[in-house]
Amino acid sequence: MVARVIPVDPFDLVIFGATGDLARRKILPALCRRFGEGQMPEGARIIGAARSEMSRDDFIEMVSQAFDEFLGAQAPDAAQRAAFFERLDYVAIDAMGDDGWTTLAEQMREDVVRAFYFSVAPSLFGPLAANLGKFRMITPQTRIVVEKPFGNDLQTARALNHTLAEFFDETQIYRIDHYLGKETVQNLMAVRFANIFFEPLWNARFVDHVQITVAETVGVGGRGPYYDKSGAMRDMVQNHLMQLLCLMAMEPPYKFDPDAVRDEKLKVIHALDPVAPADVVRGQYAAGPETASFADEVENANTATESYIALKVGISNWRWKGTPFYLRTGKRLRSRVSEIAVAFRDPPHSIFGEDAPWKANLLVIRLQPDEGMTLKVMIKEPGPGGMRLKNVALDMSFAEALGDDLHIPDAYERLIMDVIRGNQTLFMRGDEVEAAWAWTDPIIAAWQGSADKPAMYDPGSSGPDEALKLIHMDNRSWREIR
Ligand code: BG6
């Protein structure tokens, strides 16, 4: 495979929250990787900004330790680090006050792309935007990158959009959903729109149902206070699963262009049916032999927050009416797997007799791990013994198909470079985020008005039994989480 690395234009990238977990775990390693691949030109500079008073050397030492901690065997060697660190600088800054801003403003160059990455608590998004305005740092070439959570509900998301719009044009705002930067998620668009044979089948006439699964083995870890307020619905469904659903269900955009793609996704969100309480199952993990319960991890014995959720979602449009989309996501499950499974309908008539061992065709797009695709098809079992049918897998792993040295870039590598290039295709538009909340809010409101608590499930399981019933009621079953 020939990797194509197209260098971007020179830029100044400021990371607010540069000492935080996301910056150390994802953003800085992603930048180092892109640097190593030769994508950053001479004039590219990265400035860490955070509250801590520290020297440039201290910051570099911190970044170096982060590479050791989070990149393991893939950590850059000493020479690569040294070259990358030449691009780094650090400025101590008070997001809420004036300290540090003049120093930062003086470092900015006039004629290059300026990107400000808001890798901070959402309460600081507004103050940061205001200070960028106050210290005259917003040029036509300026972009901001805003991490999730983008609001907590429709009202707060709207207020945030409003605040940002006081300082920035929509074309300058890059709302990150890192799922959109995953290679296989982008591949979903390639599979759908670069091949002829899926499209005629991609509708309610031929698709029985769709399953979207994002299962994790980790618990909430040190994010207890945030997660207890958020829960799986806000943390995963409103953004990541919703994006997967949109890419899966949308009409072909007329062009692979930011607004063309986002217009089509928005239409899907508008067409989502409201979800009845009976079509939602919430779960919460219990303690295991070696792991604490969710309640203990979030330090709230009475918590009614869900660490697991399964829902059945309908889409009221010509393409999908009558084909349910089952979504599920949870923490502390049996394994880490993200996939989209498209279950096709049975053929209308069996020429092999009613007893033939039918298994409907199934297309599975594996987002992680072992990125790839499997298509389950019926064949004749070879050899004598009559026409015996068998269901087999046409299996493709990207690593095998595209070579052992294939490096699947982390989502952040792609997304940050898109910000510098000025390509918003893989970022959420303001109206899209609001529409997603408008659909999510009533589902959450229904629980808040009820005494129902999430069903408990064992860590290492595939979620609560109630989730099995949700799909069994429709005479279907979940794919196993292996
Ligand atoms: C984040 C959520 O957005 O995505 C986390 O806040 C979750 O709770 C994570 O663990 C999952 O991302 P990935 O890339 O590991 O699938």
Image (cartoon, grey):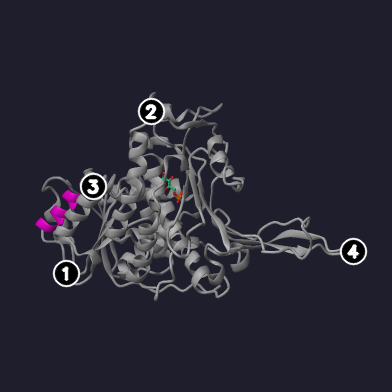
Q: CA distance from mark 4 to mark 1?
A: 77 Å
Earlier sequence position, callout 1 versus callout 3: 1
- Amino acid tagged 4: Pro
In 3D space, how far apart are the residues under numbered discs 4 and 3 (Cα atoms)? 67 Å
Q: Could you tell whether 473 is left or right of 310 in the image? A: right
Q: Quadrant of residue 344?
A: bottom right
The amino acid type, in three-letter code, at marker 3 is: Gln
**Which SS class for mark 4?**
loop
- Discs 4/1, front: 4
419 in relation to 370, above or below: below
Residue 457 within the magenta-colored segment of the rendering: no
Q: Is residue 39 above or below residue 122?
A: below
Instruction: Return the mark for residue 155.
Output: 3
Residue at 44% over, 71% down: 252
Question: Which comes before the other along the chain, label 2 or label 3?
Answer: 3
Residue matched to label 4: 384
Part of the protein shown in magenta: 125-134
The image position of residue 448, as x and y in percent, is 34, 34
